[in-house]
Structures are given as structure tokens and as C-alpha cells.
Image: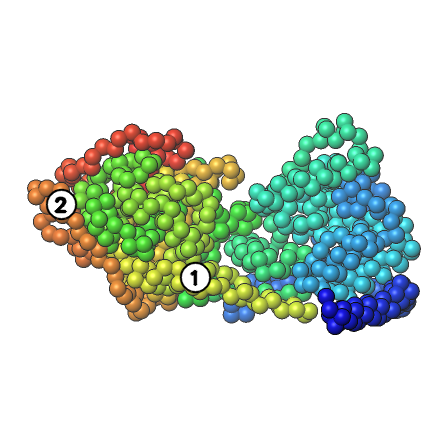
Amino acid sequence: MGRADARRAQAQESRRAAKSGGIRRLFTWKKLLGTFFGIVLLGMGAFGALYLYVDVPAANAMAERQSNVYKYSDGTVLARTGKGVNRQIVDLDEVPKKVQHAFVAAENKTFYKDQGVDLKGTTRALLSTVSGKGKQGGSTITQQYVKNYYLTQDPTVSRKLKELVISLKIDQQKSKDEILAGYINTAYYGRGASGIQAAAQAYYGVDAKDLNVSQGAYLASLLQAPSQYDWNSATPTGKKLVKERWAYTLRNMVEMDWLTESEKAKLKFAYPQKPKPAAGMEGQTGYLVEAANKELEKQGVTEEDREAGGWTFTLTVDKKRQQALEKAVDDQLESKLDREGSKVDATVQAGATSVDPKTGKVVALYGGEDYIKHYISNATRQDYQPASTFKPLVLASALENESTTQDGSLIGLNTVYDGTSKRPVVGSDTPFSPQNEDDRSYGPISVQKAMNSSVNSVFAQMIVDVTPSAAKQTALDLGVPDKNFPERPAVSLGTMNASTWDMAGAYATLDNHGRKVTPHILQSAEHRDRTVNPEKPKREQAISRASADTVTKALTGVVDAGSGSAANTSAYDAAGKTGTSEDNKSAWFAGYTPELTTVVALFGEGDGGRKQVSLTGTANSGRANGGGFPARIWADYTLGALGGGSGKTFDLQDVERGEVPAPPTPSDTPSEEPTESEEPTPSDTPSETPSETPSESPSSSAPPTDSPTVTTPPTSPELPPQPGEDDGQPGERPGGNGLFGE
């Protein structure tokens, strides 16, 4: 290195040393400590000023709660709730000591030792609020009492700071027993119950003084999430979480020496009783309010928020259409039932959802005979199978995926399938040989006529041609929930679970030319402190217009000349599909006009809702299938909802006619190529016409009901033995008869 280079290096080193020294002079330990203590002193001064400034206020509005108002879409009042708080104050000495300890163990183990605040938890909550993550736990029992009794539930920084100061003051002014008594008497437990006495009655039908340790631990566990942890309405996840919290509470009691290990080992989870509907919820009112409340939860308005009162909720429900739906069920079903004298009639439950297919607004809903008598909403329950109302979705998937038959023919309305009953499907790893209704065989039959007559063997083969996984994806895209939805051929017959609400959304999407329709019942939610604007559902294209319109064309055939003929009238243009599940446990009619989509279903419910039973014999009418009571209710309601009818017609574009494969042999060739415009022949007679009750048939022309003379069609080759075990899906086993509902 030369002298010049050495001098340059020495100069650079000097500059680095000078710069480093400058930084060290700027950030000395003395200066850092001085800054730190300055900030601490400033914070303490600010907190001291806040402590002097904030007084313990009077009781909040929750102690003098207002009612909530629910309105129809036109602004008329549907219901008022929460007029008086369901609360009865009890002295702490009336609550068993171990139950008191259960609340402390669940919420705040250090309650008897702390100063009323949890600085770490409060800081975490403040950071969560500032960052926009919403509510965050971590408060002490004292803080929660202050929030419940003196402040509001709003997750704001100012409210949290006030809570901190008031909690410190309350801890100095009141004894721990007074604070605990105030907490358990003001906390909200769900089911409209504020305070431990109301909660004990609501969940166990006893007074607070008679609660046992297990019951007390459950009530204490509820406080973390009342609506999520209510056993009778909780999801499987909610049930798992509340059981875990119940066990956590008991473990803490043992840790704090409030319960022995042997006592804990003897305790069993205390399952609560079924909830009792609140007064004023009679008839359909309770079902409408319940549906709105569920939607409010999704929009961020919790049960706790609602119970604070002062809200006005406006629903999308059209008062006149709601009345028309109730009248249709009464006229077409309830007036014909003998609920007192007939064991079958006593099990019949009706449900319905009606949707505007352009907006997704739920304009009418039928949840059951009476919310007070039947707490489960038949409109939104998802424990029954939608049966053959799923077949149009199989066709929609075939069209959307441009699927072909086993011989390579493009699937459309004219495509011919083998309609032989018990015909084994070809091309599936899972054997399936579904029986058609009444074991009828149809021979070569077009997709249109197979839809008209709801031929099981055709759609079982079609879903194999599409693939069950592709059909399932289309169904999910249309709005069918993923509940008990295996990817097997039997799914073609609607063996998953869905509600009338779910199916109304799927059919409304078809009605809306494939553009996604998500049913919703909440129009607005207004409060003196805030307004919640419901999130607008996404309106993306679920399937193409051509696919949706082709399915609509097929479903007009079902109404005009098929199993849905009871819904046929010249007063409106209609499309629809019937459905009857295995053993006749549910019967459906899903249909639409250009202006209205409605799904009606009957459910056979026994043993207080714990058992599904057959509808056969309903109102002495034989088999209560989808083309009977559900279709007649649908027609009666639709006529009334449309004001006596409508001149609007379906605007269908690019309807897929499909390809017709060559017949197997010349002797089996049909005399004419089948088209959707042909009149049904005896072999195409709809299988769902309720021949047992001719007196109840509509006055309009219906398909013949005589048993047809059917020639034996060419059969498909027998399937070789295939791998796989019976997974419990009906009919999915070699040689099985399969599902025989339409």
C-alpha cells in the first residue's frame, strides 16, 4: 500500500470514529434513562389527571334497557323485544359458595388478591382496539362488572381507559363480595337472561340457590360467548369449546383448593334444558326474528349488543307476501291435518323460504306451525335431505362442464339415457343401482323427460358422467352447503343436507340466469349510537347464463308436463322440481317464476325433533310426495304473492339441446326423436302424481296416472365387481335397490 492510500484509509477511519462518537454522545445512558423516566413521569401524570377527572358514573342504559323494534320492509312493526330486562337481583349469600368460586375460577383466579385491574390484559385490549382487531379479553371480574353496570360494550380506547380508572376506584370503595355479586347479577348469559337468577331459570329451571357445581361451572363458562356456547344452538365447534371451558373452570377450582380432585372426578357435564321462546314470539314472528338475529351475528351485532336495547331492525320481509305464505300453508296443509287425532299428522312439519331472485331479499318465510310450540325453524334447519330437488344441479354441472355421456355425446335436454330401474351406473368406482319410484323402467328417455318424471337411474348415470366432485363443486357455487356431502353417485338423489333457505338461494341463482343470489333477511340495523349497514352479498356469475337458462327450460317441463303439474297454472310462467327423500321423510317443491323463487318442504319429525319419520299417510293421502302438498302450497302462495298472476315470461338464451346418440339396435329405435315439446307417452308418465288422492288434484290438466305398459329396454352390461366398501350411503352397494324416492 502506498503512502497516499495509507493516508486515505487513515482519514476514513477518523471520519468513522468521529461519526460513532457523535452517535454515542447523542445516545448516552444518562440521556436514554432520562428520556425513559420522563416518559414514565409524563404517563403517570396523565393517568393521575385522568384518575382525578373520571368519576364513578351512575348505572348505564343497560340497567334501564330499552326495547328493540323489528319491522317489515314497509316499516310496519313486526315485533318488540326486551321491553323489560329479564333480571332478578339475588344476594350473594343465596348463591352456593362453590358456584361463586366457579365464576372466579372461570374468569379471574386472582380476583380476591388483585387491585381490580389487569394491566397486561387491558394493554392487550387497547392495542387490539387501536389496531382495529375488535374486542379482546383479559379483563378482571371488577372490570367486567364496571363495563356491564357503568359503561357500554363499545370497543373504544376511551371506554377502556374509563373502565381502568373506575375499576381501581370501585375496588377501593366496595368489598370483593359486593363486586362479585354485582358482576353475576349484571352479566348477560344468553337466552334473554341477565343475571344469575334469570340464567338459572333459563338454562336449568331452578333458582340460583339450587344450582350445583356442574351447573354453575357451565353458566360461568357461558359468559365468554353466550350465543356460541348455548348447548341447544351451538355448532359442534361451540359445543366442544364450552365443554373445554367447563373442564378448565373445574381444574382451576381444584388448583385454588375450592374443589377436591375426587369431587371433580364425580362431576358430569350439566346439559341445559331446551330454551323457551319469549312472549310475543307466537306464530311466525319468532322465526322471522330468529333469522334476523342470526344474520345480525354475521354482520357483527352480537347478542350482547342486541340485548343492550335501543335498536330498530328492518327486515326484507314483505308483509303481504308473508301473509300469503301463511295462508297458503293453512289452506293447503294445516286445514287438512288432524294433529290431535292422527299420529302421522302430528309429526308433519312445514317450512318455506321465498326470495326475490334479483336481489336475494327474503320476502317471506315459514318456520313452522308456531314458534312457541315448535322452536326449530323449518325454513333454516339443515338436518333433512333435499332429495330430487338436487337433480337440476347435476344437470347444471353437466352443462357447465360440457360433460359427455359414456359414448361421447354432449349432454343436453335431448340427450338420451337408459331409464331402466336398478340399472348399474357405468364408469364409477362406487357401485350404484338406484331404483326408480315404484320400480318403473322407462327405457331410452331424453334428459328432458327424465327430469319431468324424476328418473333416478338417469341422473345417477349423469353424475358419474360429470363426476361427483365436479357436480358437488357446482352445487357449492350455487349455494348448497357442504353438509354430509360425499362425492358418490348417490348424491345425485340429494342425499346431502340442506334447508329451504339454502335451496331457495340455489334456485334463485338459476332464476337469475346463473348470477349468484345469496338470501338475506336484514335490510338495516339502526341504533342511537351507530348504524350497521348489512354487507351486500357478492353477485358473481356462479354458472354461465346458457347453463342456467337450459336448466330453467328443463324445469318448465316438470311443471307443464311432469311431476310438478300441481304447480301449473296459466296465471304465471313457472319452472320447478319435486323431491321426496328415502322412506318419504321429507317432501319438497322448489320452483320459480321470473319474479319470485320459493322452496316449500314437509318434514316428518318424531320424538320431539330427535327422530326423522315417514310422511306416508299425511292427511290420509297416501305418499306425501313433493308433487302433492308442497307443490300445492307453492302454487297457492305464488298466485297470492304475485297479486293473482303475472304476464312476465322467462327470457332464455342459448338453451343447450344436447346430442342424441344412436340407439343400441334398430329394433329399439324410437319412432320419433324425443324433444322437450313432445307430449308424455305412457312410459314417460311422471312417477310422482298422487293417484291416491284424485279429489285433491288441481283442476288443470295433469299427466295420466294409469300404470304404464313398459317394454323391456336394452340393459347396460353388468358391472364387474368393484373395489370399495359400503360407506353407509343407501344403495351404494352391488345389487342394492338404492334410493327409491323421486
Q: Is residue 544 left or right of residue 287?
A: left
Depth check: 59 or 714 in front?
714
Q: Which residue is mark 2?
A: 663
Q: CA distance from mark 2 to mark 1?
A: 40 Å
In front of the other: label 2 or label 1? 2
Question: In the drawing, what numbered circle is on residue 517?
Answer: 1
* Circle 2: residue type: Pro
Q: Is residue 559 left or right of residue 146?
A: left
* Circle 1: residue type: Val
| Image coordinates for residue 667, horizontal then vertical, percent | 8, 42
Q: Residue at x 23, y 53 (%)?
A: 410
The reply to whether residue 115 is visible in this rendering is: yes
Among the 4 quarters of the image, the one containing residue 219: top right
Crowding around mark 1 (Cα neighbors within 10 Å: few <14, some 14 to 19, many 20+) is many
| Sequence-wise first label, 2 or 1 | 1
Q: Is residue 295 left or right of residue 159?
A: left
The correct choice, above or below, for 492 with respect to 264 in the image is: below
| Image coordinates for residue 7, horizontal then vertical, percent | 77, 71
